[in-house]
Amino acid sequence: LKRKHVRIELDQEDKAVAIIYADLKEDASIISGKILDISLGGIKVEISGKHTDLFKENQIIPRCQLKLKGFMVRTQAKIAKKEDNLLGISFIDILDDDVKKIAYFIHQKLKIIVKNQL
């Protein structure tokens, strides 16, 4: 499976967090995870080991919020891959405006990476 989007790895300084709703019921499990990498198509998230049972591959996530330096992005998503406490999440229903926010975030991050390599 070939990737369609540039993917960048994030580090501690990015403090990027995903808030994942297992479902939208009153007592829904709302899990917070660290975003390890991001592309316009999705994210890789590390969650606490005790929450791994809440998720399975191909599960639809009704709401996923990404906190990225100065931005909040909301989207529907799908668990594309699950490996131990790592979730590969694909964005499903995402607004163009939110795609632009992610693109801007990635662009800013790439500028820093390039600058640091010079």
Image: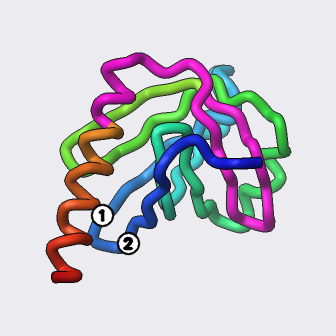
The x and y percentages for residue 15 are: 33, 62
Disc 1 crowd, CA 10 A, few/some/many (<14, 14-19, 20+): some
Classify mark 2: helix, strand or loop.
Answer: loop
Position of 23 relative to 12 (above/below): above
Residue 26 visible, this orientation: yes
Most foreground residue, 9 or 32: 9
- Give the image's coloring scheme: rainbow
x, y (%) of residue 7? 49, 55
Q: Which residues are magenta?
A: 77-101
Dot 1: what SS?
helix
Q: Amino acid at mark 2?
A: Asp
Badge 2: residue crowd in 10 Å (few <14, some 14–19, many ≥20): few
Residue for point 16% across, 82% down? 118
Q: Residue at x 42, y 53 (%)?
A: 17
Contact, CB < 8 Å: mark 2 with mark 1? yes
Question: Which quadrant holds residue 80?
Answer: top right
Residue at 77% over, 48% down: 1
Q: Is residue 80 left or right of residue 92?
A: right
What percent of the width, then of the height, locates residue 50? Answer: 74, 63
Asked if residue 28 can be seen in this view, the reply is no
For badge 1, the amino acid type reads Asp
What number is the disc on residue 62? none
State the residue in front, 23 or 106: 106
Residue at 83% from the left image edge and 36% from the top image edge: 58
Label 2 – label 1 distance at C-alpha: 6 Å
Residue 32's spot in the image, x, y percent? 52, 51
Question: Does residue 113 show up magenta in the picture?
Answer: no
Badge 1 is on which residue?
Answer: 14
Q: Is 75 located above or below residue 113 in the figure?
A: above
Q: Is residue 92 magenta?
A: yes
Numbered tag placed on residue 11 in the rendering:
2
Above or below 51: residue 103? above
